């Protein structure tokens, strides 16, 4: 056997390829609790795709010591004046960190600590974001094209979506005079 191997997965021509790539999409009907303007939401097609995620899990979930890799693609759009965004989560094991690296488009990484202090970092091609442990994270597309970014996180981190689903972030990201603004709810 040759000692020079092909890589397990590749990302070429904006496509993640390889064995065992997990693909999911999240539509407005799956995200009813995260958007602020429920009246605007009800007028939209519930089948509208808000984002897609491709993930590579080389080890089992909840195993300590491994790493996972994923690419998220958020479509452009708004619900009312709130930008299309991901559900957002804390990690189930709270102290686990994560890296995000923006590939294309423009957006905002919204972060919230356990005392509900919320802030955001600008995302653009080449921007790299270290998300500390104990920090909830969600991303929003503030541009007119797909926002995509890759993520790297520990295999035992897990996802706690419930806390955000029930309590939200303390601030929301809205479009005001064509620009993103982080405002209290
Ligand atoms: Fe995460």
Image (spheres, rainbow, N blue to C red):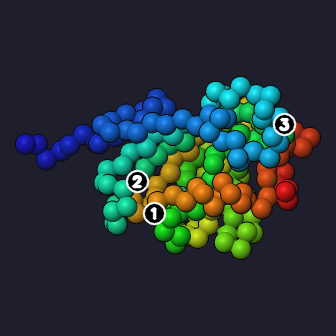
Up/down of 172 relative to 113, above or below: above
Q: Is residue 132 left or right of residue 66?
A: right
- Residue 185, picture quadrant: bottom right
User: Is disc 1's CB within 8 Å of ligand 1?
Assistant: yes
Give the Cα separation between the discs numbered 2 and 1: 10 Å
Tags 2 and 1 touching, CB below 8 Å: yes
Which numbered disc, 2 or 3, marks the residue that appears first in the sequence? 3
Separation of residues labelled 1 and 3 (CA atoms): 35 Å
Q: Nearer the viewer, mark 2 or mark 1?
A: 1
Number of numbered discs present? 3
Residue at the spot x=92%, y=40% of the render?
177
The numbered dot on residue 157 is 1
Quadrant, the N terminus: top left
Q: Residue at x 63, y 46 (%)?
A: 86
In the rendered structure, which disc, 1 or 3, sits on the residue that comes first in sequence?
3
Q: Which residue is mark 2?
A: 68
Q: Residue at x 70, y 33 (%)?
A: 76
Residue 146: horizontal and vertical position, in percent? Answer: 64, 33
Residue at left 71%, top 25%?
45
Kindly state the secondary structure of the residue where label 1 is placed: loop
**Dot 2: what SS?**
strand
Q: From the image, tell me which residue sits under label 3.
A: 39
- Beta carbon of the mark 3 residue lies under 8 A of ligand 1: no
């Amino acid at each position: 056997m040759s000692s020079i191997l092909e890589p397990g997965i590749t990302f070429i021509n904006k496509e993640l390829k390889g064995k065992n790539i997990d693909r999911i999409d999240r539509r407005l009907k799956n995200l009813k609790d995260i958007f602020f303007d429920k009246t605007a939401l009800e007028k939209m097609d519930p089948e509208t795709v808000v984002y897609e995620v491709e993930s590579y899990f080389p080890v089992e979930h909840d195993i300590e010591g491994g790493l996972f890799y994923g690419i998220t693609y958020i479509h452009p759009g708004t619900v009312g004046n709130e930008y299309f965004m991901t559900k957002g989560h804390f990690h189930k094991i709270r102290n686990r960190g994560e890296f995000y690296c923006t590939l294309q488009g423009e957006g905002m990484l919204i972060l919230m600590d356990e005392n509900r202090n919320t802030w955001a970092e600008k995302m653009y091609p080449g921007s790299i974001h270290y998300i500390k442990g104990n920090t909830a994270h969600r991303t929003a597309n503030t541009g007119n094209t797909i926002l995509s970014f890759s993520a790297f996180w520990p295999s035992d981190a897990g996802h706690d979506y419930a806390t955000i689903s029930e309590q939200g972030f303390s601030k929301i990201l809205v479009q005001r005079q064509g620009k993103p603004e982080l405002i209290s709810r």
